[in-house]
Amino acid sequence: MDATVQIDRETARTATQEQIGTLLHDVRPEIILGLLDNPHFEENHLCLLLGRKELSTALLEEVANRNQWMSSYRVRRSLAWHPHVPFTLGLRLVRELHTVDLVQLVLLPSGAPPMKHLAEELVLARLPQLPSAQKMILARRGTIRITGALLADGQPDILPIVLDSPFLNEGQVLRALARISVPARVVTAIAESGRWSQHYSVRLALIRNSEAPLSRVISFLPSISTTDLRILAESSSVPARVRPYIRRELANHMQRGGGPKSRG
């Protein structure tokens, strides 16, 4: 080891509490390694250090090899959140995170993508047990898959937030409507949503859904193309109560010369 490197490492290893605060911002690996051996170096210091996103994978592995640090949940969480966390270590640590920290990892812009994906899977699995406060946060800021799951979950106080979420897309709305077990209030909320009921494919899905409010379904029919009305009129998936209105609208289309030509 170079003599200068040895001196720097020894300087960090013997630094006082006051000096440690300054050395935490040093970019030299030997300084960081020396700090890890310093008897005055505490958990708070390490968590501040792990907040530095430029730390290398090698340095993170060095931390992970120190049993005295890995016994701390705060340290394990900070490692799991780091963008350069070693893959195998990160997967193990993410599985150990509390649900509230999994939610934060999902929303963390700088987290490692594989860890964020695993955290998302774990959050989806635990979604029914999450408190409303966390669901509201996820409804406003969550991923496409999480907002879709929250929509299908159908918790009344969360529904309006989810339907307005910029992360919710048409595909997730259609998936929710296609689920056999989706609560009726979800179908009604989508049908009454000015944002989503304007989508042609969503209107078709609502027409086929037995839980959709009849008055809303009837209001959609004039916008449906003649071709699709013919298909709907013969489809066994369309509720029986809706078919007479479809046939009537189809007749109106024919009288008007074919009805709407485009889907919009």
Image (spheres, grey):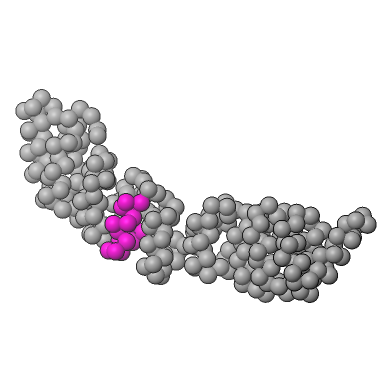
- Residue 67 belongs to magenta span: no
Could you tell me which residue is drawn at 66 percent across and 57 percent down?
52
Image quarter of residue 86: bottom right
- Residue 41 appears left or right of 106: right
Image quarter of residue 224: top left
The percent coordinates of residue 258 (x first, y second) are 13, 27
| Residue that extends furthest to the front in the rendered view of this protein | 18
The answer to whether any part of residue 94 appears in the image is yes
The percent coordinates of residue 219 (x first, y second) are 13, 43
- Residue 250 appears left or right of 124: left
Which of 147/107 is in front? Answer: 107
Which of 172/210 is in front? Answer: 172
Could you tell me which residue is drawn at 60 percent across and 60 percent down?
81
| Residue that extends furthest to the top in the rendered view of this protein | 257
- Residue 114 appears left or right of 198: right
Residue interval drawn in magenta: 149-165
